[in-house]
Image (cartoon, coloured by chain):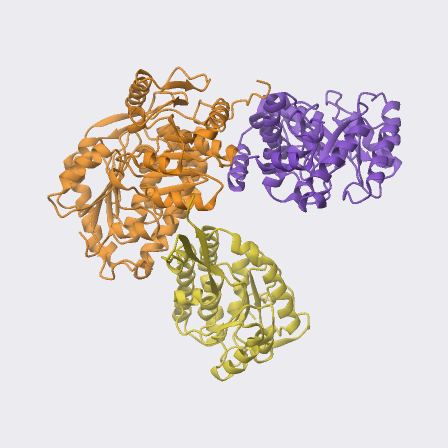
Chain colours: A purple, B yellow, C orange
Amino acid sequence: MSFYGLVDGSDSSLRNYLKQLPGVDQVGAEARAAMLATRSIKTTSKAWAIDTAISMVDLTTLEGADTPGKVQALCSKAFRPDPTDLTVPRVGAVCVYNDMVGIARQHLDSIGAQELPVAAVSTAFPSGRASMAVKLQDTEDAIVAGAAEIDMVIDRGAFLSGRLIEVFEEIVAIREVCGDRAHLKVILETGELVTLDNVRKASYLAMLAGADFIKTSTGKVAPAATAPVVLVMLEAVRDFYDLTKVRIGVKPAGGIRTTKDAIKQLVLVNETAGPEWLNPSLFRIGASALLNDLLMQRMKMSDGYYASPNYVTID
Amino acid sequence: MSGRLEVMKTYKLYINGAFPRTESGRSYEITSNKGEFLANACLASRKDLRDAVVAARTAQPGWAKATAYNRGQIMYRIAEMLEGRSDQFAQEISLQTGASAKESLQEVSDSVDLLVWYAGWSDKLPSLAGSTNPVSGPYYNFTVPEALGVVGAIAPTNKPLLGFVAAVAPILVSGNTAVVLASSSAPLSAISFAEVVATSDLPNGVLNILSGQQSELAPWFASHMDIDGLDISGLPVDQHGAVKEAGVENLKRISSFQATAEPGRILAFMEAKTIWHPIGN
Amino acid sequence: MIFEYAAAPESRSVVKIDPVYGHFINGKWVNGSSHFNSINPATEEVLSQIALGTAADVDAAVKAARNAFDKSWSKLSGRERGKYLFRIARIMQERAREFAVLETLDNGKPIRESRDVDVPLSAAHFFYHAGWADKLEYAGVDTTTAPHGVVGQIIPWNFPLLMLAWKVAPALATGNTVVLKPAETTSLTALLFAQVCQQAGLPDGVVNIVTGDGSTGSAIVNHPGIDKIAFTGSTEVGKLIARAVAPTNKSLTLELGGKGANIVFGDAAIDETVEGIVNGIFFNQGHVCCAGSRLILQESIADEVLEKLKRRMDKIRVGDPLDKNTDLGAINSAEQLAKIRELTAAGEAEGAGRWSANCELPTNGFWFAPTIFTGVTQAHRIAREEIFGPVLSVLTFRTPAEVIEKANNTPFGLSAGIWSEKGSNILWATQQLRAGVIWANTFNKFDPASPFGGYKESGWGREGGRHGLSAYLKGSAK
């Protein structure tokens, strides 16, 4: 087998490939990310950025306490974030646990939101600690229930103990289950990988194995989508495109709570991977509270004065 | 009857950036050197000490990781805040010790200046106490001084503010965090110092201030396995031996000092780490 | 471009510029006898009229400095001197935005740089040196040291406020008094600094600022009442000063030019290296004595690095220095722009391959697009002479020994950069390189605690850190 003509599926081929990747200097990467965070995005570019960010949000609820009522409310909000302003774009997707996918899909269809995809977390999210059989079934169930997107987690234990080929083969197997029914996001859980060198290696591993998107985190572990981590992942997809002419998407998730945070992400994309990635098919933001802050900032831009949480819906 | 009734201050402990009363509920009388009632101070217990050490330990890594410049600036701000409260502190000193207004104000000025002096050491001491060492071989060998960790101090009585500042400043400037027990008979200056610290951007837990009986608490300072160093300048000399013995259990670094302004007071609570790295292609 | 950043200008209203300035002598403003224009190099707009200091003005300043030294400054304890410097540092922090905007208007550098680098570092320099004033006995210099007395300081236009801080802070901390001449094209932040001295209550005459041109500088260098000269500027002028001072008893420190080698080994962390290359030559429009102006790439990764570098250079935002998103500002003067053009023309004529970033340059003001020359060898003028602009000369090497030889093959010796993930390699290279400041896996990093200065024709002495103090104390050495 050949994966983009870069590795042949064997352990040694994968090891060698990942080993020859250039290192990441942490201090330098943090400095670059910090400099990009000083970009001042105002007026027309801010308005554009807010609407773009809204369209990239994967509106998420992943709680043990999730109920059909909660998920349905989330779906309504996802499709019509501001009932008083229909110019607000709909979000990128709704993200739920796989036993809620059916409820989400049904509700979205019933309110005319057939175009809005449902993304399901799978493979024993968030820990990834379960048998392969469970993970495969997890994924299949979600797709059958209507998920068009699968957010899987990698086996961090295997990665950190050097069993890279196992991590690789799991992704390949899940990719196969998805087939052309669903796109695959691979969650690296960068907070557990800790070093930027690991983030780079894991990014390449995931892309080589067939990821359509690489995603930073489950949102259940801090730190999640820090700027240097997203920077390294954007560099990876940029360089991967040079090698293969294929564009892989990036999804930061967790810790992006304010409009300022979201705009900083868009600047990172713009000045690292490039403007081709500035759309929901290649960049998503996993968030929940962020949406209301985006709406409040949007109100301020059109009204000219500061908004209040009273004027946005809680779901 | 003339004038208005003054609202008297309640003197509490300062732990982790908050002002709790002692968990023991106990208090004791503070009187002026003439025997007049001044205040009821908290009689801190070993449990308050325990809580303070937890706060200090939690705060220590962050404080040590701050840049030397940042620590120096915060300590300079402590000096700024103290300067602004000169009259308040001078009055308190006079009440406790009977010193004249002029002497008390001098003590406050000296304390401000001492804080400034120590603040200026933060980004300089490593250039002096560290070194590159010319070892015989193709190795880059260098020594860096590092903060010790959590340091306790028993503050002296005779200059209740200056002695307290002389204990606190050298501990903090290098990145240690501190738990300080004020003078038993004249603790008010130390306790009020918490007001200065709370307005100085010093992170919670970096400095913790207790009031109580030194004879009761000194043994608990000495035996605490999570206190790394101890300044016993404020303890009577005849108690030093027992404290040092108790401190042996975790090889506490224990010192007492005569002079207030000495880089040695900083170095006493620092470690030295030496690193080797080969030189070659 | 999809994501165009809308204009994000910093407001000018925070700073007030007078239409004409005099000199700051003995704590007061003194009228100048003649004036010259100071312009904003980004727009060529006249900002103010600056006084041209005469020999008489210099003489008045030196007398004021001498008087202040004898009567007040040398009578103060180190502790009290230090407290003045702490005040100055704090006031500079309070007025940071004003200083940043003024520096950008006068110099042409982007507001992001003056706001995030120049001004904070300047305040930090005063804060650091304030703490030395009462600790000189611990500084490891000769215990018989004393201040020189009156020092004359001449600073360049590339970091006007920061160079003032590098000079004034240690001079005052060690007990000297100062006569300072800012560069002709960039006097405004020095003049604002005079206001800070007044707000801090600094005794009259401790700091004196005399503006002017080369003739003013000459008057300072030659004034018999000055005990020590400190100069930062070109090697050419540095040598003139050194010759003038040689027959006298004056002490002299110099911080001159450079042609820093930025060395990239095959095992470097590539993305961060590219950032470091860009920072090394395009920070401050390349108007940096320690710029990494010779990029020396290991052949094995040369193509990859160059491709990434060009792509990165195309993202450099050139334009209005007051816009918060601008990365590269204006060239400081028409004169400097002409020099850059002359040398880049020479580069082309000598056969090097020229490539410039694709950017639209404003029509008014002095501008130069970020440019690299590939296929450069040591024999090219653009590999030997300091261009002092956003122009990078790119050479290659095969072995570590070879790159050290190339890096050292220059009369300059100010800075060098090393990019490698192998620690022992870095330490080996630092041992071999003849440069006063070496950055490994980073570039253009400055700190008041870190000594800065050059080997060979890059100057005499160090600024910053414990080492920098000795220049301002007369020990036994001459």
Residue closer to the observer: A203 or C389: A203
The spot of residue A300 in percent (x, y) is: 65, 28
The N terminus of chain C is located in which quarter?
Answer: top right
Image point 23% across, 27% down: which residue? C35
- Eyeballing the image, is C72 above or below B216? above
Q: Answer above or below: position of A194 versus B85.
A: above
Query: Could you say which quadrant of the image residue C417 lies in?
Result: top left
Q: Residue furthest left?
A: C247
Query: Quarter-wise, where is residue A114 in the image?
Result: top right
Viewer-closest of B90 and A12: A12
Residue C440 or B171: which is nearer the viewer?
Answer: C440
- Residue A292 seen anywhere in this rendered image of the structure: no
Q: Is residue A177 visible?
A: yes
* Number of numbered labels in the structure image: 0
Image coordinates for residue B87, horizontal then vertical, percent? 45, 63
From this view, report whether residue C335 is shown above or below residue C177.
above
Residue C162 sits in quarter: top left
**In the visual, does C471 lie left or right of A310?**
left
Residue A313 position, x and y percent, is: 77, 32
Return the x and y of residue C342 as percentages of the image width and height: 29, 19
Residue at x-position 18% and y-position 44%: C62
Residue C331 shown left or right of residue B68 in the figure: left
Nearer to the camera, C256 or A243? A243
